[in-house]
Each structure stands twice: as C-alpha cells, then as structure tokens.
Image (cartoon, helix red, strand yellow):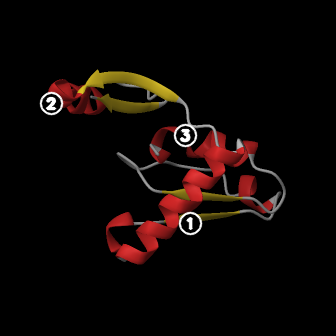
Amino acid sequence: MLSNVNLSKDLQMLAFGGRVTIIGSRGSIEINPRDTMAKESSIMGVALFFATPEENKECAALLYAGMEAGWLRPVVGSQYPLDKAAQAHHDIIECPGAAGKTVLTM
C-alpha cells in the first residue's frame, strides 16, 4: 500500500529474490533500479478489482491461515466505530503518513 511513499524503502529491505506486490499508490515515485538488480528481486502490480470470486475466496483463506499461524501480523493503526466510516475515509485521504491499517469496529 502507498507505494509512492514506501516502495523505495521496501526494495531496500527485501531479501535476495524477494518480491514487492503493489496494491495501492497515490502518485508516482522514482526508484533506483539497482535496488532490484542487486537482490534479483521484482516488483509486481496488482489490481484487486480484476480478481474472480474464487480468487478473492482463496486470498482470504490464505490471509486467515497466515494470521492463525502467526507469520502474518497485520499492523492496526486508527480504529473508528462503523458510524464514523466517513471520517475514517476522510482521514485516510487527507492525513499524510500511513501507520497500519484503518479498522472499522462495530
């Protein structure tokens, strides 16, 4: 997410042969291609709205399995009650610097 802010740092942190998957960006970015060459890594862009219902189901199952196993640990940032969803959306767009996922609660 926010590859226009994080991609350069993401590429520097990758392991040899690693891959960065971009699923969100709010603008362009300039990167140093040597950050991918030195680690023989790759960058892949994904548009989730092209996924089939079966792919969405498989993705959700894999994410859930990773959280259950403990190797996937999402960072939770701001939390809003469901009736403040409009404020949450506003803050995501207007407030710079993402720190974790924004969560709506019941």
Instruction: Give above or below for 68 relative to 57.
Output: above
| Mark nearer the viewer, 1 or 2 | 2
Q: Is mark 1 on a helix, strand or loop?
A: strand
| Mark nearer the viewer, 2 or 3 | 2
Residue drawn at 48 percent across, 59 percent down: 60
Q: Are marks 1 and 2 in contact (CB under 8 Å)?
A: no
Rate crowding at label 3 as few (under 14), some (14 to 19) or many (20 or more) other CA atoms within 10 Å. Answer: some
Rate crowding at label 2 as few (under 14), some (14 to 19) or many (20 or more) other CA atoms within 10 Å. Answer: few
What's under tag 2, amino acid-wise?
Ala
Residue drawn at 55 percent across, 31 percent down: 75
Instruction: Give above or below for 45 relative to 79.
Output: below
Residue 74 quadrant: top right
Q: How far apart are marks 2 and 3 (CA)?
A: 25 Å
Res 6 label = 3
Q: Looking at the picture, how far across and down is residue 29, in whole percent?
A: 48, 48
Res 86 label = 2
Q: In this view, does 4 lie to the left or right of 17?
A: left
Q: Is mark 3 on a helix, strand or loop?
A: helix
Q: Which of 97 and 67 is in front in this view?
A: 67
Q: Identify the residue under disc 1.
A: 44
What's under tag 1, amino acid-wise?
Met
Q: Which of marks 1 and 2 is nearer the N terminus?
A: 1
**Is residue 22 in view from this perspective?**
yes
